[in-house]
Amino acid sequence: MADKKTNAVRLVEDRGFACELRRYAVDEDDLGAENVASKVGLPLAQVFKTLVARGDRTGVVVACVPGDEELDLRKLAAASGDKRAGLVPLKELQPLTGYLRGGCSPVGMKKGYPTFLDQSAFDHPCIAVSAGARGIQMILDPHDLQALTGARVADLCVRPKETLPPP
């Protein structure tokens, strides 16, 4: 894997966009964004998770949200024109996207699903997303990610409960 390029990386390069690849040792017991951020040397807010959901009207949709936030399924539903949305079961992730948990990239999925990028991506000059395999992240301009995926920008997040101020 050290020298191999993933389909996501090939697609980025074929479309003429620049990205930096950062490889890291995978901990199968901890695929979380916090662990990835520490290994690739970026703040958690710049490491974006790719989550796959299903809306009651639109079907499968993709959400890219920062590692320090939680996806608000109600906001995703509203952005996608659905009444409700729920994360797809883990067993459906690979058949739908071609990617495994911990290596799911918003770029180069089996099918072009409607993609939504949290507006906070544009607070940073670059963000990291999975490059399509565990142990490799693509660092790229959020505008380039939006262009590559056709993503619509929306407020998709809710702050994690432990960071909410006391009532």
Image (cartoon, rainbow, N blue to C red):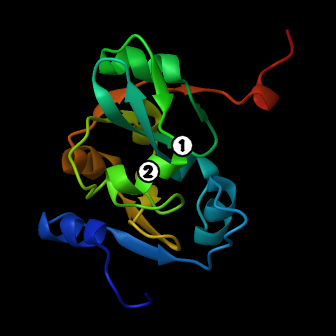
Residue 142 in view, yes or no = yes
Residue 141 in view, yes or no = no
Amino acid type of the residue that numbered disc 1 sits on in the rendered structure: Pro
Q: Nearer the viewer, residue 158 or 59?
A: 59
Residue extending farthest right: 166
The answer to whether 159 is drawn above or below residue 77 in the figure is below
- Residue 107, image x, y percentages: 29, 56
Q: Nearer the viewer, residue 121 or 3?
A: 3
Residue that numbered label 2 is attached to: 93
Look at 35% across and 19% down and name the residue there.
79
Residue extending farthest bottom: 3
Q: How many marks?
A: 2
The answer to whether marks 2 and 1 mark residues whose Cβ atoms lie closer than 8 Å is no
The answer to whether 153 is drawn above or below residue 139 in the figure is above
Task: Find the distance from the CA under tag 2 to the CA under tag 1.
Answer: 19 Å
Left or right relative to 61: residue 36: right
Left or right relative to 120: residue 153: left
Residue that numbered label 1 is attached to: 66
Image quarter in which the C terminus is found: top right
Look at 62% across and 54% down and name the residue there.
33
Look at 39% across and 66% down and name the residue there.
131
Image quarter in which the N terminus is found: bottom left
- Residue 76, image x, y percentages: 43, 23
SS type, badge 2: helix
Left or right relative to 111: residue 92: right
Amino acid type of the residue that numbered disc 2 sits on in the rendered structure: Leu
